[in-house]
Image (cartoon, rainbow, N blue to C red):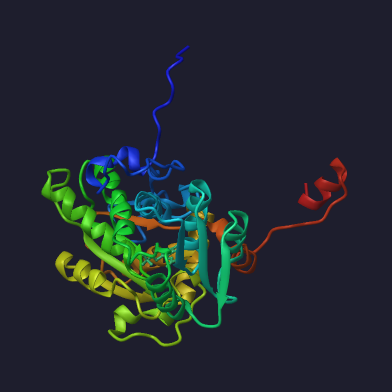
Amino acid sequence: MSTLPLAPRGVLYHWAEVLPLTEQTPRITLGEGDTPLVRSVALERECGLDELWFKLESCNPTGSFKDRGMVVAVAKAVESGARAIMCASTGNTSASAAAYAARCGLDCYVLVPGGKVAAGKMAQAIAYGSRIIEVDGNFDDALNAARELTARHPVALVNSVNPYRIQGQKTAAYEICETLGDAPDVLAIPVGNAGNITAYWKGFGECAEVGRATLHPRMLGFQAAGAAPLVSGVPVPEPNTVATAIRIGNPASWGGAIGARDESGGSIEAVTDEEILEAYRLLAAREGLFVEPASAACVAGLLQHGRAGRTRGGRAVAILTGNGLKDPDTAIAEYVPNITKSSATVAGVERALGW
Ligand code: AN7
């Protein structure tokens, strides 16, 4: 039996050499990153692909990809002497910020659009002890306020306009190249504030540069039809979608998303709420993957391409950005429950099952 201590896990340990860390950067970790890449068993053909892989970012410690970037942003905030952090959020950024702030003894202020954050994410922000401000406006309004507030007060802004967030999130691209032995032909990803598509494109570019990959993937970004400014080319003043995580009308990383699209020969397209919810149901029922609606948007997009005969085959990776447990209300509304009441007896259960 080995008595060796386990090596610490986490983005700051595993990817130190590709991150802007110094000796003074505290090596904090909640065990983020190193998420599973699992092959599709059901939807590959329908998407017109030779291979479809899912990157389970839902397996991060707070249940979304945000932890990869947040651990870097919070470590750098601590290094710079910050005592408090702030973010605007549709829910996942606030859950992640609150967790790392709790871990590091920082105060955490989160600005969320009132009534538009999924219940599980609110539960997280509450549990980790953040100070929650529900604003009377959407995410874009909240982000504008957070930018101004952090310019005026000694509080670090940890939205993805903070470059350390992008640095941390790029590590998912490194992991994909490592696991597959190369970059995939296609990277499908949901797009809201556009930090993540920007981060992946940066990561794949770096991997190609240093020989970790021989190719660049085509970047396919998918927005919800009611919140698709990058598709229409103009900000959406009142974005709306069942995928509340990506209910964003004026993405902060607009240029990064357009750069990723154009440099990769990819596209940013819209999927309707109906398409998102169909993919959401299929992922759970046929792949065993319970994700939140925003994450299903990229699979909805691949299904749309496959059914329209627009796919050129090859190997694709879809980024499943957040856990289905985040949004129990949508799950209860959208999945058809198969529930029968019964007495707690063998005979009762047999009757209920029709055996
Ligand atoms: C599950 O938490 O913007 O395009 O404030 O939670 O990088 O914004 C969340 C975004 C995709 C879009 N999937 O990523 C927030 C927030 C999930 C998300 C996105 C988000 P970006």
Q: Measured from the top left, where is residue 153 in percent x and y?
A: 43, 69
- Is there any visible trace of residue 243 in the rendered image? no
Residue 141 occupies quadrant: bottom left
Where does ligand 1 appear, by image quarter? bottom left
Relative to 121, 235 lies left or right: left
Compare residues 64 and 150 and report the one nearer the observer: 150
- Closer-to-camera residue (32/266): 32
Q: Can residue 250 be seen by looking at this rendering?
A: yes
Relative vertical location of residue 71 with respect to residue 196 in this rendering, above or below: above
Residue at 29%, 44% in the rendered image: 175
Tell me if 9 is positioned left or right of 24 in this view: right
Q: Residue at x 48, y 75 (%)?
A: 273
* Position of residue 89 measured from the top left corner of the image (x, y, whole percent): 47, 68
In the rendered image, residue 13, in percent from the top left (x then y), is placed at 33, 38
Of residues 99 and 157, which is closer to you in this image?
A: 157
Numbered marks: total: 0
Q: Quadrant of residue 220?
A: bottom left
Instruction: State whether residue 307 is above or below residue 211.
Output: below
Residue 4 point in image, percent of width and height: 42, 18
